[in-house]
Image: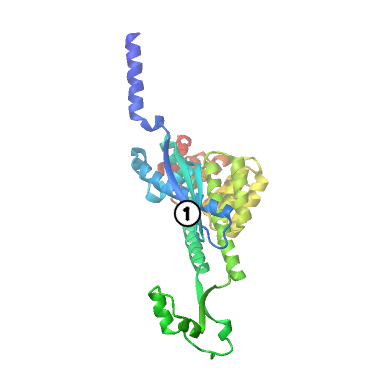
């Protein structure tokens, strides 16, 4: 019995030493996001933008941490893939919100705690590769960065003012149309000295700053940029929900993304995948067809369509055609081989299915390795 007990503890200790990530405690990161309100910003929008900024800084910190983990190094992830992984597995909690008013400038600062659960990190990497979400996340992040830059440019344009000259009322009838401010007055101002009474009486102009009115076109452009930013943020939350298998939550936030920006193909694709897992195949097919109408070469949408069609009577050949088109467009995608493998399996073509599952396994899709055996 003593020998068995010693062997048990030896094996347990060995397992714990070899698999530290499986027992890793969640790690927290504190970050802040700040947003300075423009003329067209509401407090609600400013708060949302400050939170987006805080999450961006949190992801940057998590990326540094993940890059140092041996499991991530062994997986040979690119910097972009690590960033996508951090985005997908991070949970964020708002700790505080501070509003400041300095003169005419109003700003909001939000502090958050970002928590990373590094347990079973290998499985999470495999899951990301299996479901092919990294490229979608990266594309969203690029679009978001572009929109935020455009937002900053629009705010800067709003803050520009045009100096205009206005005549003093008492001199309006006596002075010629084109006059200049007398040099003694300018000299006195530069020396922070009050002009003399005689100088005051001879001053024909009053210089004032009048803000350019913001046109309806500029307002509309600003509103569209804001909507697109919030749509991408909602879509990112949707893909995080898909990773956690929270299908109802995913459906809800994808609907918000579509409401804000009806042209987001990936939002329709995400919605269709959530509906597929909720066993609402007809609605799922409707949404994925809209996604493909927006972007006919979306490999993610083509793959999801193949998944939906393979379970519908008489649609298996259409499912295979969709899967083949997706693989043709992107032959290095593990998730697409897994999907086509499932279609082949449904068709009873075991050899072809096993071949595709093996290809997905070789690309790092762990679940496909089980199906390849």
Tell me which corner region of the image, top left, top right, bottom left or bottom right, holds residue 312.
Answer: top right
Q: Which element type, helix, strand or loop, lies under badge 1?
A: helix
Task: Give the answer, above or below, for where 89 lies relative to 44.
Answer: above
* Residue located 32% across and 11% down the image: 3
Q: Residue furthest top?
A: 1
Is 195 placed above or below 28 here? below
How packed mark 1 is, by other alpha carbons closer than 10 Å (few <14, some 14-19, many 20 or more), is: some
Q: Quadrant of the N terminus?
A: top left
Which residue occupies the foreground of this view, 252 or 277? Answer: 252
Q: Is residue 351 left or right of residue 172?
A: left
- Looking at the picture, the colour scheme in use is rainbow
Q: Residue at x 58, y 84 (%)?
A: 170
Please say if 254 is above or below 206: above
Question: What residue appears at the point 53 percent right and 39 percent down from the top-left corner?
Answer: 244
Residue 335's x, y, as percent? 49, 45
Residue 308 visible? The answer is no
| Residue under the point 63% across and 54% down | 259
Residue 342 spot, x, y in % from top left: 54, 41
Q: Position of residue 44 (x, y in %)?
A: 58, 52
Which is nearer the eye, 347 or 4? 4
Counting labels gives: 1
Q: Residue furthest front?
A: 197
Q: Position of residue 250 (x, y in %)?
A: 59, 44
Q: Which residue is labeled 1 in the image?
A: 141
Q: Quadrant of the C terminus?
A: top left
Q: Is residue 197 visible?
A: yes
């Amino acid at each position: 019995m003593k020998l068995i007990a010693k062997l048990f503890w030896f094996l347990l200790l060995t397992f714990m030493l070899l698999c530290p990530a499986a027992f890793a405690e969640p790690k927290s990161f504190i970050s802040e996001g700040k947003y300075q309100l423009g003329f067209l910003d509401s407090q609600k929008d400013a708060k949302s933008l400050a939170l987006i900024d805080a999450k961006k800084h949190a992801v940057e910190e998590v990326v540094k941490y993940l890059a140092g983990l041996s499991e991530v190094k062994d997986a040979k992830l690119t910097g972009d893939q690590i960033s996508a992984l951090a985005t997908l597995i991070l949970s964020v909690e708002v700790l505080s919100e501070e509003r400041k008013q300095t003169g005419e400038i109003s700003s909001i600062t939000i502090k958050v705690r970002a928590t990373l659960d590094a347990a079973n990190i290998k499985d999470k990497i495999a899951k990301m590769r299996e479901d092919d979400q990294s490229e979608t996340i990266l594309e969203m992040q690029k679009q978001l960065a572009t929109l935020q830059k455009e937002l900053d440019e629009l705010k800067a344009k709003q803050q520009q003012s045009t100096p205009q000259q206005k005549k003093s009322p008492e001199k309006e009838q006596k002075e010629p149309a084109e006059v200049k401010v007398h040099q003694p007055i300018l000299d006195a101002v530069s020396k922070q000295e009050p002009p003399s009474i005689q100088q005051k009486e001879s001053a024909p102009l009053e210089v004032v700053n009048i803000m350019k009115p913001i046109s309806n076109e500029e307002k509309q452009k600003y509103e569209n940029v804001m909507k697109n930013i919030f749509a991408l943020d909602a879509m990112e939350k949707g893909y995080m929900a898909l990773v956690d298998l929270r299908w109802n939550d995913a459906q809800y936030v994808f609907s918000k993304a579509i409401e804000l920006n009806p042209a987001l193909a990936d939002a329709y694709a995400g919605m269709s995948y959530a509906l597929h897992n909720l066993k609402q195949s007809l609605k799922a097919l409707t949404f994925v067809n809209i996604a493909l109408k927006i972007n006919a070469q979306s490999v993610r949408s083509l793959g999801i369509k193949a998944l939906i069609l393979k379970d519908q009577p008489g649609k298996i050949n259409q499912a295979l055609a969709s899967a083949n088109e997706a693989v043709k467009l992107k032959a290095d995608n593990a998730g697409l081989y897994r999907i086509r493998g499932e279609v082949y399996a449904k068709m009873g073509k075991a050899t072809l299915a096993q071949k595709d599952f093996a290809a997905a396994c070789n690309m790092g899709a762990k679940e496909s390795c089980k199906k390849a055996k």
